């Protein structure tokens, strides 16, 4: 186990050593020495940034995953709110107008073309202008 390791004196402030003693097992380390070695390797990876399996890739990956997850969560919540509002609008329109199925299918096809033409940025003003034109 210790064949390739070398023992040396390590001077550390008592509060730092106490922190190591409290947290090394949370990092699945069997000893404070293992924790300190991992910390040193982590810091070396941070300083050199060339070690592809070192500091930056894992930190960047985990940070990006967290950002994407939060963004996805916000987008999903907003899409849900928009879907609810759209359902309300559709029900109001359906309740106040009598539109036959053929006209509805034709309108849907025209709307698909119009939304594609506008890259999805259709406003209510655009719809009014389109209806007049």
Image: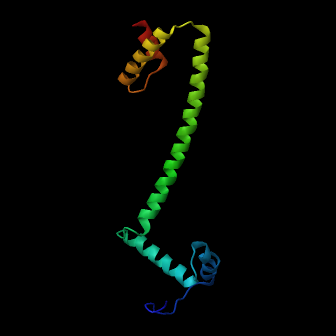
Give above or below for 81 relative to 106.
below
Q: Is residue 129 visible?
A: no
Residue at the image position 61 percent from the left and 15 percent from the top:
92
Q: Residue furthest front?
A: 101
Q: Is residue 117 left or right of residue 28?
A: left
The vertical placement of 2 against 51, above or below, is below
The colour scheme applied to this rendered structure is rainbow
Task: Report x, y in % for residue 51.
Answer: 36, 70
**Is residue 125 depicted above or below 98 in this figure?**
below
- Asked which quadrant contains residue 95, the reply is top right
The residue positioned 52% from the left and 89% from the top of the image is: 10
Q: Residue at 44% of width from left, 59% of height from top?
A: 60
Q: Is residue 12 visible?
A: yes
Q: Nearer the viewer, residue 8 or 95?
A: 95
x and y, in percent, of residue 98 in the image:
56, 6
Q: Residue 89's quadrant in the figure? A: top right
Residue found at x 45% / y 58%:
61
Q: Position of residue 132 (x, y in %)?
A: 43, 6
- Looking at the picture, tell me which residue is in the foreground, 97 or 43: 97
Give the quadrant of the C terminus.
Answer: top left
In this figure, what is the number of numbered marks?
0
Q: Is residue 115 left or right of residue 25?
A: left
């Amino acid at each position: 186990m210790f064949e390739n390791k070398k023992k040396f004196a390590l001077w550390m402030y008592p509060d730092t050593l106490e922190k190591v003693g409290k947290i090394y097992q949370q990092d699945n380390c069997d000893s404070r020495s293992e924790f300190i070695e991992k910390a040193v390797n982590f810091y070396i990876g941070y300083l050199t940034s060339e070690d592809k399996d070192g500091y930056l890739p894992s930190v960047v990956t985990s940070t990006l995953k967290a950002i994407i997850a939060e963004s996805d969560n916000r987008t999903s919540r907003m899409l849900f709110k928009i879907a609810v509002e759209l359902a309300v609008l559709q029900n109001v329109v359906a309740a106040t107008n009598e539109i036959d199925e053929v006209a509805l299918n034709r309108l849907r096809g025209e709307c698909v073309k119009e939304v594609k033409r506008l890259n999805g940025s259709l406003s209510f003003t655009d719809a009014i202008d389109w209806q007049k034109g």
